[in-house]
Image (cartoon, rainbow, N blue to C red):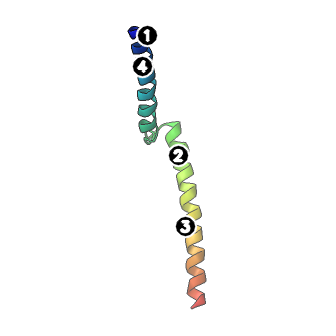
């Protein structure tokens, strides 16, 4: 009986460790030169452009509102 409990405990512990490790490492930036890096770069650059346009419009509006 003790061996069954130990086996189940180690199995569940292994799954928990693997899930925790995957959670920690999934947020790492992709290696430059890969397809994943290019996709992430395009997405980030598009976000930068949107924020820049909003900032320029805000700055333009505040310039004339004073």
Give the mark nearest the N terminus, 4 or 2: 4
Give the mark nearest the N terminus, 1 or 2: 1
Q: Quadrant of residue 62?
A: bottom right
Q: Are marks 4 and 2 in contact (CB under 8 Å)?
A: no
Badge 1 marks a residue whose secondary structure is helix
Count residues near mark 4 (Cα–Cα under 10 Å), then give few for <14, some for 14-19, many for 20+.
Answer: few
Q: Quadrant of residue 5?
A: top left
> Which label sits on residue 4?
1
Give the mark nearest the N terminus, 3 or 1: 1
Residue position marked by numbered label 3 in the rendering: 52
Residue position marked by numbered label 2 in the rendering: 40
Q: CA distance from mark 4 to mark 2?
A: 39 Å
- Quarter placement of the C terminus: bottom right
Residue position marked by numbered label 4 in the rendering: 9
For the residue pair 26 and 3, the one nearer the viewer reads as 3
Q: Residue at x 53, y 53 (%)?
A: 44
Q: In this rendering, which labeled residue sits more in front, label 4 or label 2?
A: 4
Q: Quadrant of residue 13?
A: top left
Q: In this rendering, which labeled residue sits more in front, label 3 or label 1?
A: 1
In the rendered view, tell whether residue 58 sits above or below residue 3. below
Badge 4 marks a residue whose secondary structure is helix
Q: CA distance from mark 3 to mark 4?
A: 52 Å
């Amino acid at each position: 009986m003790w061996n069954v409990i130990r086996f189940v405990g180690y199995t569940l512990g292994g799954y928990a460790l693997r899930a925790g490790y995957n959670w920690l490492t999934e947020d790492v930036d992709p290696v430059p030169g890969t397809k994943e890096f290019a996709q992430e770069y395009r997405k980030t650059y598009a976000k930068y452009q949107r924020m820049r346009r909003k900032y320029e419009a805000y700055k333009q509006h505040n310039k004339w509102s004073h």
